[in-house]
Amino acid sequence: MKRVAIIGAGVGGLTTALLLAKKGYQVTIFESHYYVGGCASFFKRGKFRFDVGATTLSGFRENSFLENFLKENNIDLITKDLEIPMTIYGSGKKIRRYKNREHWHEELKKHWPDIDHDQLWREVENLSDLSWDNLDLLNSLPPTNLKKALSLGMKLKTSSTLGINSFKTLGEKLLSKNITNQEYLKFLDEQLIISTQTKTSEVNYLLSTLGLTYPEDMKYCEGGVSELSLKILDKLIEGNVKIQMRTHVNRVKKMTDFFELTYELKKGKGIFQKEKFDYVISNLPLQNTAKIYENKKLVEKSENYIGEYSALTFYVATENFLKDNDSLYHQYHYEKDELIESESGSLFISVSAIDDRLKAPDGYQTFTASTHFKNFNFEMSETEYLEFKNQISEKFIKILKKVFPDMSFDFRHFEMGTPKTFVHFTKRHEGLVGGLPHKIQNHPLIFPKNNMLGNGFFLVGDNVFPGQGIVSVMLGAQNLVDENF
């Protein structure tokens, strides 16, 4: 029986482990933390539970990859449909992001009546649907040899619309439609930054359509998105997959017929062990992977493909403040210096459902709020770091009072996380989250590929195609297993 080592128990690593175990491989997962899930994990503070980073799960559409994966593996997530998945606040506007497309178009017309939203959004939605209907293209992207390039060419011939629209930016598309309203462009920018990690002027148009329609397929998961990882973990335990928590992999070395892993059991007080595997799969960012596995091509990719954003995150517990029919996800668009030293940006707030007893006891709700952040100063002294957190927290509370004026600010818990926090708990390079931006220069044809090393060492996660987002990472795992095992 072939042995596979998976480094990192994020969603990508867990999904890969489940698929390989079903194929009969002997799988061992190495995870340095206490909990599985990676950036989609959770932590507890007393009776309250918080999502660490990722807080949304989309892809719930009929016969979709996610729906089929859950059914095929008997994974039962308790979810809630969202008529208004998100409410957006910006430029004095309160915009309800409806699931229903016609309602969404009408909402946009109320706020920007001079723009032809029907034409623009129907094109966006149709292209998004076409992308979902042609997920089999993933098996050819990015092509790693001539045979796969020819196969991709034949597929794109029948889906030429996808190919054509992947070589332009959304900004170019908007300009061709004479859409230049700066307020509207900022509105689109902030939608895209949370789903594609980039903005209208740089985002691949094809991938932007998936980002802009992301809220349509969202559902609320009781307990948070970490429930998906925990349910997959249950299946792995049932399947006798070996899971080594609190274990740090220090080095991977390619031998003639196998890989040698050197790892440290943290609970073993510096005791190092070595083990042999036929295959190794890294669920770490490229930069982290390059530190434990010496490979010239991997180093080159890690230097050229780097995520751009880390995050400032707030974890709050307070008395119930939202009604049952209110949006559970909110995005506030702030102006220059209102929260951080930036020209502009947005704060994304995910609130627990009023009846979610996994997140909070009766009478209380928890929420996670985060904003993208660049160029964090890791050299701050402890005093400077505490002052930085206090200043940002004060600004954050002022914004909360605008968005949720009826909230009780007698918090039961308040905590702020920074890139330093993410480095400590997730070990991700410089605390970068969200994966690689879907910029036009990061075209799917050249995006880092899961089998780009071609020697039995594979990659999975948000740093390889198809990139960031829970479902994308799961799709990448499926693609990796289908194509290589």
Image (cartoon, rainbow, N blue to C red):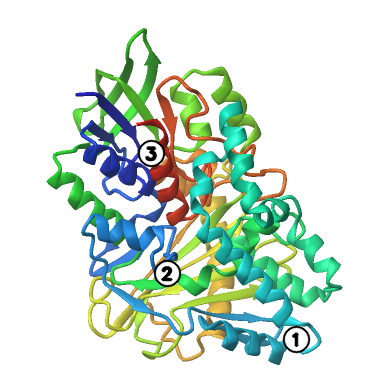
For this view, does 195 lie left or right of residue 113? Answer: left
Of circles 1 and 2, the one toward us is 2
1 vs 3, front mark? 3
In-front residue for pair 229/323: 229
Residue 154, position as x, y percentages in the image: 61, 42
Between 327 and 119, the one lying in front of the other is 119
Badge 1 density bin: few <14, some 14–19, many ≥20, Cα 10 Å: some
Residue at image point 19% right, 50% down: 235
Q: Residue at x 55, y 44 (%)?
A: 381
Q: Quadrant of the C terminus?
A: top left
The residue at which mark 1 appears reads as 112
Gap in angstroms between the C-alphas marked 1 and 2: 29 Å
For disc 3, the neighbor class at 10 Å (few under 14, some 14 to 19, many from 20) is few
Quadrant in the rendering for residue 193: bottom right
Q: Residues within 10 Å of mark 2 (few under 14, many from 20)?
A: some
Regarding residue 51, the answer to whether it shows in the image is: no
Among numbered discs 1 and 2, the one appearing first in the sequence: 2
Element type at mark 3: helix
Up the image or down, 187 lies above or below 19; here it is: below
Residue occupied by mark 3: 482
Instruction: Tell which circle, 1 or 3, labels the residue nearer the N-terminal end.
Output: 1
Residue drawn at point x = 56 percent, y = 40 percent: 141
The type of residue carrying mark 1 is Trp
- Say what amino acid the circle numbered 2 marks: Arg
Q: Amino acid at mark 3?
A: Asp
Residue under numbered circle 2: 61
Secondary structure of the residue carrying tag 1 is loop
